Amino acid sequence: MQSWWLNGRASAALLDHVAATIQYCQQRNAQARRSHAKRTRRKLREKGVKLTEIERCRWGPT
């Protein structure tokens, strides 16, 4: 990370910026994940697929 060899305020500012960037990316990824799930469920409903009526796969012991 760039801030390892910096000292004082420059290091703190860089760390704050990196933390804010990571937080923003995580929020956008979560929002995209929710949006994708909603869109997929809507498309399935339009095609007559009801997820509540589909039997779930049973995974083996392995």
Image (cartoon, rainbow, N blue to C red):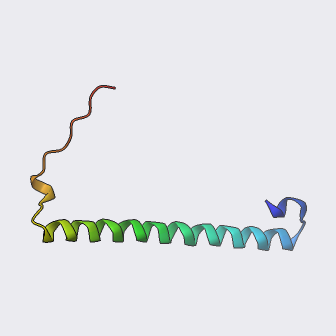
Q: Quadrant of the C terminus?
A: top left
* Residue found at the far top of this picture: 61
Q: Which image quarter: residue 41?
A: bottom left
The residue positioned 9% from the left and 65% from the top of the image is 48
Q: Quadrant of residue 16?
A: bottom right
Residue 50: where, in percent of width, then height?
A: 11, 60
Q: How many marks?
A: 0
Residue 55 occupies which quadrant of the picture? top left
Q: Is residue 60 above or below residue 2?
A: above
Name the side, left or right, on which 22 lies relative to 58.
right
- Residue 37, position in %: x, y? 31, 65
Instruction: Describe residue 43's horizontal placement relative to residue 50 as left or right.
Output: right
At a point 56% along the width and 72% down the height, the residue shown is 24
The residue drawn where x is 29% and y is 25% is 61
Farthest front residue in view: 47
Q: Is residue 35 above or below residue 54?
A: below
In front: 19, or 43?
Answer: 43
Q: Position of residue 46 (x, y in %)?
A: 14, 71
Give the residue displayed 44% in from the left and 66% down from the top: 30
- Is 39 placed left or right of 28 in the picture? left
- Quadrant assignment for the N terminus: bottom right
